[in-house]
Amino acid sequence: MFTGLIRELATVKSMENDFLTLSAEYKPNIGDSIAINGACLTVVKLGSGEFTVELSAETKSLLAVENLKGNVHMEPAMRLSDRLEGHIVQGHVDTVGTITNISKSEKAYDFFIEVPEKFIKFIIPKGSITIDGVSLTVNSVENNSFRLTIIPHTMENTLFETYQVGSEVNIETDMFARYLYHMFGSKEKSVSWDTIEGIMARY
């Protein structure tokens, strides 16, 4: 499990076949789980100032693999004693979204992201979402897109400042939204999304 709070920007040293090697100040151990751009990966090798994680074919098929270069978001798995300041993130990327518009206001930036229509049902206004491993709040939702408001601190300390219209990003929808939909949402309207949102607000 993760929180969606980025520990640091790691640097990609190489990407060969299924193995991604990175350098970072953080020093993991063999077998540790670590999120890279929001994907939970396992450390399989250590080097001098660097470490290597392995990506399965299934994992690569779900990610924006073209972003595994330069700097990437990195977060070690959380410990039970850690404060949960973001939201509960599994590191299981659901899909890749495309940034369709970036609008700058006086104090923030609005990012509009389009996703395959089948995933929009898991994205709820004022609910949580993870973009390339960053825990964020959804402001509004349309038919197949949603809007995020990114504050200057997030822009300055993540890769959001490098994103452009057309950039693809890894998306993990909210775990509770997925679970609740599978329990109730697919069963002939046995519960409304207003009810589901109320349930989620209690956590």
Image (cartoon, rainbow, N blue to C red):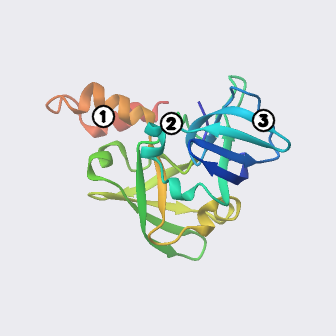
Looking at the image, tell me whether mark 3 or mark 1 is earlier in sequence order: 3
Q: Specify the amino acid type for callout 3.
A: Leu
Nearest the camera: 156 or 65? 65
Q: What element carries label 3?
A: strand
Query: Closer to us: mark 1 or mark 2?
Result: 2
Q: Which of 47 and 85 is in front in this view?
A: 47
Q: Name the residue under label 3.
A: 46
Query: At numbered mark 2, what does the secondary structure look like: helix, strand or loop?
Result: loop
Relative horizontal placement of residue 187, taking residue 134 as reference (left or right):
left
Quadrant in the picture for the N terminus: top right
Residue at (44% x, 34% y) in the render: 175
Q: Where is residue 77 in the image (x, y as percent from the top left)?
A: 66, 32
Tell me which residue sits at (46%, 42%) in the image.
93
Q: Residue 190's image quarter?
A: top left
Which labelled disc corresponds to residue 55? none
- Residue under label 1, please give it: 195
Q: How far apart are marks 3 and 1 (CA)?
A: 47 Å
Amino acid marked by disc 1:
Thr
Residue 120 coordinates in the image, percent (x, y): 31, 49
Does 194 sit left or right of 15 as displayed? left
Residue drawn at x 29%, y 44% is 121
What SS does tag 1 mark?
A: helix
Residue 187 is at least partly visible in this image = yes
Q: Which residue is drawn at 24% across and 36% down?
A: 192
Residue 150 falls left or right of residue 63 = right
Give me the disc on residue 56: 2
